Amino acid sequence: MKSLLATLALTTALTLPGLAMARPLTLTTTLTNYGGDGAYLALYVTDASGAYVGSLWMAGDKSRYYEHLSDWYRATGGDTAQVNGITGASVGAGRTLEITLDLADTLFDAGYTLRIDAAVEDMRDSPNEVAVPLTTAGAGTPVTGRRYVASFAYDM
Amino acid sequence: MKKTLRLLVASTALTAGIGVPAWSAMQAPSDVLRPVAGFFEEAPQTMPLVLASDDDDDDDYGREGSRRGHDDDDDDDDDDCDDDDDDDDCRGGARNPAPAGTVAPPQNGLFGNGAPPQVQVN
């Protein structure tokens, strides 16, 4: 009985910090009716110095188009390993992409920025379409993109 | 004299016997003589011909600042980069990324619990 309790206490102690280190987050991106094909979107995070930290999602599965997500491409060299397992279809005009994930807690209020690069076939590329600081205060506040994103918000 | 003649005939026959199948195996357009080629050293090195496209006018990204599509003309024999196919090889062998759900997300320190994002498009 004692050993069972000890095991339970140990597993709880190990699990709790893990839960506390992640924060469920919903990223909602609504595109304008720009009248073109599906948009490629790269959602990624940079640190306080603007250096690339990592990718959160890649909408668009053909790597040959990634060079048009120019900021992301410059930061990663187009390395598809950066978006392995976090890649889905491109997003049509007027559609809403909703991504739910557990984001590391340390990213909030620490100078990190969530960025979106966008590109549409036969239309102008839009690097730095959206750039929002990751802060707890900024959660739920929609922002407008430069060209293709009608609104973007992250909710906790 | 007879002996010399016999030697000449024998060496010619031997040369023809070995040389002709070998030459034929190299020249044969069909697989008919392929078994013969197996007797020679060249056979293990026989490789299927891989057609390398020299067509550099497809996937023309000529317009600055725009994601251009592939051209859809029928005379383009390079279909490696067509949207319709699921061929992962394109642009010098660059692979498309693994779709969500097929592999774990990258270990970039962003995903708190390592679980892949859940996505829906409305």
Image (tube, grey):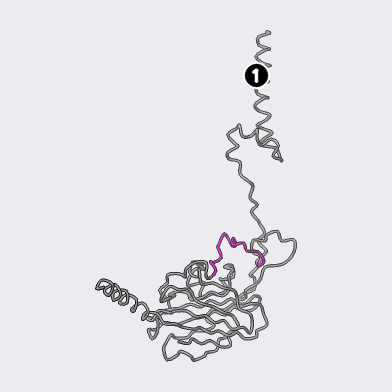
Q: Nearer the viewer, residue B106 or B10?
A: B106
Task: Name the chain letter of the residue that bears numbered label 1.
Answer: B
Residue that lies at the very extreme toward the left in this rendered image = A2
* Residue name at image x 63 percent, y 79 percent: A92
* Magenta residues, start to end: B83-99
Residue B97 falls inside the magenta stretch? yes
Residue that lies at the very extreme toward the front in this rendered image = A1
| Side of B108 where A143 appears, left or right | right
Residue at the disc numbered 1: B11
Q: Quadrant of residue B38?
A: top right
- What SS does tag 1 mark? helix
Residue B87 falls inside the magenta stretch? yes
Q: Nearer the viewer, residue A129 or A61?
A: A61
From the top left corner, tell me how far across and down residue B14 is, in percent: 65, 21
Q: Residues within 10 Å of mark 1 (few under 14, many from 20)?
A: few
On screen, residue B75 above or below A114? above
- Given the image, on which type of amino acid does mark 1 rest? Ser
Location of the N terminus of chain B (image quadrant): top right
| Prevailing SS of the magenta stretch | loop
From the top left corner, tell me how far across and down residue A156 is, in percent: 45, 87
* Residue name at image x 30 percent, y 75 percent: A8
| Side of A44 where A124 appears, left or right | right
From the top left corner, tell me how far across and down residue B47 is, in percent: 61, 44
Q: Quadrant of residue A49?
A: bottom left
Q: Please tell me how many numbered marks the rendered image carries.
A: 1
